[in-house]
Image: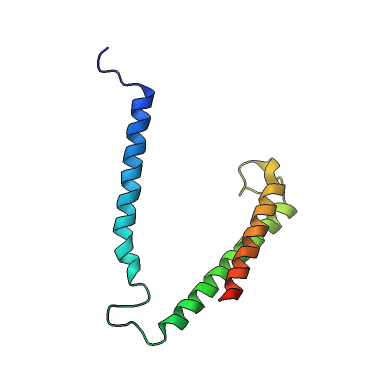
């Protein structure tokens, strides 16, 4: 059959479309995120304090969620539906604990 495509051809085409979609998504969302805190005219007075406070709250919440996930990984290791493989609770707890330390550290740096 002359029109039959191989799996490699299809995979390469899918990867090309995926890369194009990611690039397009980045180009579309950048202008939307550009003026989140400041406008062209200089923004709100004291906007750096607003940014700092928002980032600190974000990192505190992310650290809390990670710490709670680590706690759940230890307390209910084989019954937690958040983990796809019930045997990896030790690794999950360790990774989530490290992430919570990083998030809390970033929050206190601000």
Give the residue furthest to the left.
2
User: Residue drawn 32% across and 50% down?
Assistant: 23
Q: Residue at 38% across / 76% down in the picture?
A: 37
Horizontal and vertical percent position of residue 50: 45, 81
Q: Is residue 79 visible?
A: no
Position of residue 97 relative to residue 2, above or below, is below
Question: Is the residue 71 above or below the residue 108 in the image?
Answer: above
* Residue with the most extreme bottom position: 45
Along the line of sight, the residue nearer the viewer: 89 or 23: 23
Q: Residue at x 66, y 58 (%)?
A: 98
Q: How is the image coloured?
A: rainbow
Quadrant assignment, res 59: bottom right
Q: Quadrant of the N terminus?
A: top left
Residue 84: x and y in percent read: 60, 42
| Extreme residue in the top direction | 1
- Classify 90 as above or below 57: above
Apparent side of residue 20 relative to residue 104 in the rendered image (left or right): left
Q: What residue is rendered at 32% in x and 46% in y?
A: 21
Q: Which image quarter is the C terminus in?
A: bottom right
Residue 26 is at least partly visible in this image: yes
Q: Quadrant of residue 51?
A: bottom left
- In the displayed structure, does residue 75 sit left or right of residue 64? right
């Amino acid at each position: 059959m002359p029109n039959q495509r191989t799996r490699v051809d299809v995979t390469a085409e899918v990867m090309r479309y995926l890369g194009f979609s990611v690039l397009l998504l980045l180009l579309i969302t950048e202008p939307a995120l550009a003026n989140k805190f400041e406008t062209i005219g200089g923004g709100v007075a004291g906007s750096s304090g607003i940014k700092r406070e928002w980032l600190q709250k974000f990192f505190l919440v992310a650290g809390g969620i990670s710490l709670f996930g680590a706690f759940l990984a230890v307390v209910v290791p084989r019954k937690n539906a958040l983990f796809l493989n019930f045997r990896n609770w030790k690794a999950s707890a360790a990774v989530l604990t490290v992430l919570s330390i990083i998030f809390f550290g970033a929050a206190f740096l601000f």
